[in-house]
Structures are given as C-alpha cells and as structure tokens.
Image (cartoon, rainbow, N blue to C red):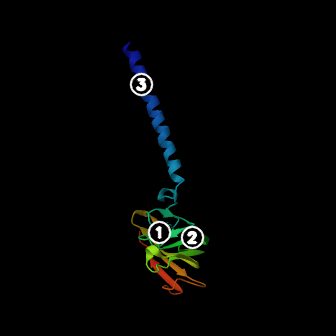
Amino acid sequence: MGSDMQRRKLSTAAVVFATMSLAAGVVPATASASPSVAAQPADQVVVVDCSMKAQVRPSEYLIACGDGNSRLTELKWSSWGPMSAVGVGLNVVNDCKPYCAAGKFHSYPVNVRFERPERWEKNPDQQRYGQLHLSFPGSRPEHLPPEVTYKLLG
C-alpha cells in the first residue's frame, strides 16, 4: 500500500506542477499585450509616460503629469526611428482662467517630435526619448511661443 500512496502523491504533484507551468506560460503572453517595457523590442526607442511605462507610437501623451493641464491627443506618427519620432496631433491645454480648476481646455494643432534618445535608467537595455519638441503651425496657447521644447523625465 505504501507504493500506491507514493504513486498517488507523485501523480498529484505532477498535475499541480503541470498546472502551475501552464499558468506561468500563459502569463507572459497576456503581459505582452499591454504597452509595457517587456512588450517593446530592446532596439525600439520608446517614450516613457507619466506612469513610467514605455510606449511606442502612442495615440495620446500627457505632458503635464502633475496637474493634467496639457496633453497631446489624436497623435498620428509619420516616423518612429532610432533618433526621433515625428508626428502631428492636438495639444489640449487648460487656459487656467481665472484659475486652473475653473479653466477651460482648448485644442491646438501641433507638430510633435520626440528626440534625443538616451539610456532609460529603469531599464538600461532600453533607449527612451529624452526630449519633446512641439511647434504650432497656427494658433497656440497664449503663454507658449510658436516652438517649445520639454526635457522628458524617466
């Protein structure tokens, strides 16, 4: 009876191990569907969002992480390369009149360029863009010049 009991324990252990292995094999496939660092090829330059997640060709990008008063929307990318990413979209900006909580958001057409790739400290094998350059071909927020450059944190 001892060997029958050992066989049952061994069989149960094998089923548990197989189930755990199967579950572990499914997790990476699910994780790779999200816009995380693991989903990005190491040779692809990324832009890091306010949540410290890597993105490639995002359709939206929050510029003002602290208060959300400036963001890029409707982004369309003409190129995404090793030195820069170029696209167009809208810069949606709060006018903060009479103060930001009571202000209104306005949209301005904008040319967007992510540039200056550098090593990402969070993931040293990954390059990320370190600078964002905006140029307004028409109207623009009254507090901004026709071209503005932001250093990106990350």
Quadrant of the snapshot with the N terminus = top left
Tag shown at residue 128: 1
Which residue is outermost to the top? Answer: 1
Tag shown at residue 10: 3
Tag shown at residue 141: none
Q: Position of residue 107 (x, y in %)?
A: 57, 76
79 and 71: which one is in front? 71
- Secondary element at tag 3: helix
Q: Quick check: marks 3 and 1 in contact, CB under 8 Å?
A: no
The reply, left or right, for residue 148 in relation to residue 88 is left
Quadrant of the snapshot with the C terminus = bottom left
22 and 61: which one is in front? 61
Q: Position of residue 5 (x, y in %)?
A: 39, 17
For marks 3 and 2, give the one nearer the viewer: 2
C-alpha gap between disc 3 and disc 1:
49 Å
At 51% across and 87% down in the image, what residue appears?
A: 145
Q: Quick check: marks 1 and 2 in contact, CB under 8 Å?
A: no
The reply, left or right, for residue 137 in relation to residue 3 is right
Please determine whether, in this image, residue 48 is positioned above or below residue 149: above
- Secondary element at tag 2: strand
Say which label, 3 or 1, has the lower sequence index. Answer: 3
- Secondary element at tag 1: strand
Q: Amino acid at mark 3?
A: Leu
64 and 8: which one is in front? 64
Number of numbered discs overlaid on the protein picture: 3
For marks 3 and 1, give the one nearer the viewer: 1
Q: Which residue is mark 2?
A: 73
Say which label, 1 or 2, has the lower sequence index. Answer: 2
Q: Amino acid at mark 2?
A: Thr
Q: Position of residue 91 (x, y in %)?
A: 55, 76
